[in-house]
Amino acid sequence: MLAAQAPAYSNMPAQEVIFILLGILSLASAFAVVTTRNVVHAALWLVVTLAGAAGSYLMLTAEFIAWVQVLIYVGAVIVLLLFGIMLTKAPIGNEDRLTSENRIPAAIVAIASAATLVTLVVDAFRHEFIDLGPGSGAAPVGRSIFQAYVLPFEVVSLLLLAALIGSIVLSRRDEENH
């Protein structure tokens, strides 16, 4: 009598399963970001998308990048975005004047752009491999961020501060006119 063979999916490591689930979560929440009609809900779905990306970085043993993703994007940028939405009194709910009838052409362009990007990335990096052995941790990344790229990070922080101050000024000006 022949022994029963185990199904092929049982040989997949748990890390790959988690990575696939994080990818599915990120894709689904990214789809929700662009399809929801409520701006605040879109920002909250963006939090889920960025958290999924951070989880993917953790699965790739890039802990430093994962925490930078959480602290900078999820913590700061999303809070700034929500704060700006609330201060400028932007329309939050479903408004007919903001709805465009170009959804089908937009979807075609989005799918074509995504297919082109995926094709280019796969073709460009087909033979590249990431060394995850000892000594390939976050030290080179941290060194390059805090040495070579300090100025761009500081410029971005000043731009975000200017955007926040601008939204406060615009919201105050609206309150004074009413």
Image (spheres, helix red, strand yellow):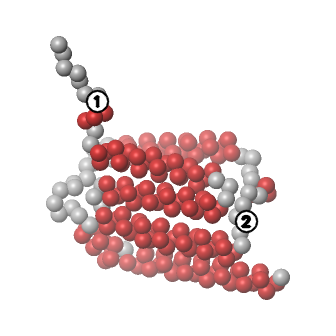
**Residue 45: x percent and y percent?**
55, 58
For discs 1 and 2, the disc positioned in front in the rendered view: 1
Comparing 166 with 40, the one in front is 40
Comparing 106 with 127, the one in front is 106
> Element under label 1?
helix
**Residue 150: x percent and y percent?**
37, 78
Q: Residue at x 73, y 65 (%)?
A: 91
Of labels 1 and 2, earlier in sequence is 1
Looking at the picture, which amino acid does disc 1 mark?
Ala
- Can residue 109 be seen from the camera position used here? yes
Residue 91: assigned label: 2
The quadrant in which the C terminus is found is: bottom right
**Residue 26: x percent and y percent?**
47, 51
Looking at the rendering, which quadrant does residue 112 occupy? Answer: top right
Q: Is residue 149 above or below residue 61?
A: below
Left or right: 153 in relation to 34? left
Q: Is residue 26 above or below residue 138?
A: above
Badge 2 local density, few (<14 within 10 Å), some, or many (20+)?
A: few
Looking at the rendering, which quadrant does residue 20 occupy? Answer: top left
Left or right: 4 in relation to 155? left
The quadrant in which the N terminus is found is: top left
Determine contact: label 1, label 2, CB under 8 Å: no
**Residue 81: x percent and y percent?**
58, 70
> Element under label 2?
loop
Q: Residue at x 25, y 27 (%)?
A: 6
| Residue receiving disc 1 | 8
Q: Residue at x 49, y 48 (%)?
A: 27
| Tally of numbered tags | 2
Q: Residue at x 58, y 46 (%)?
A: 110
